[in-house]
Image (spheres, rainbow, N blue to C red):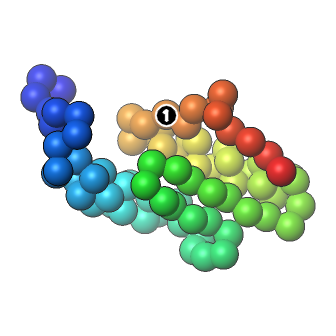
Amino acid sequence: MKVGLHQGSVLSPLLFVIVMEMISRQLRAGLPLELLYADDLILMAEIEESLRDNIVKWKSGLEAKGLKINTGKTKVM
């Protein structure tokens, strides 16, 4: 990418939402299991194994589109 938006541009949030809507459409199961807010993703599950499966699904799906999940900021509660 040679040209982009400057950080702080008023178009940045709108374009981010539009792009994330299209990218995540195939990955989403919907509320209450997933919540997209700004540039954060919250995944919920009844058991830890299901949660790990969802994390892997989202990680591989986003990476296929050229995005990365910051695993250093990932928390499991």
For the question of whether residue 19 can be seen, the reply is no
Residue at 68 percent across and 38 percent down: it is 74
Closer to us: 11 or 32: 11
For the question of whether residue 60 can be seen, the reply is yes
Q: Is residue 17 left or right of residue 7?
A: right
Closer to us: 7 or 1: 7
Give neighbour class at mark 1: few <14, some 14-19, many 20+ (Cα, 10 Å).
Answer: few
Quadrant (top left, top right, bottom left, bottom right) of the N terminus: top left
Instruction: Judge whether 4 appears above or below 75 on screen.
Output: above
Q: In this view, does 9 lie to the left or right of 48?
A: left
What is the count of numbered marks?
Answer: 1
Residue 49: % across, % down: 86, 53
Residue at 23 percent across and 53 percent down: it is 15
Of all residues, the one furthest to the top in this rendering is 2
* Amino acid type, label 1: Lys
Helix, strand or loop at mark 1: loop
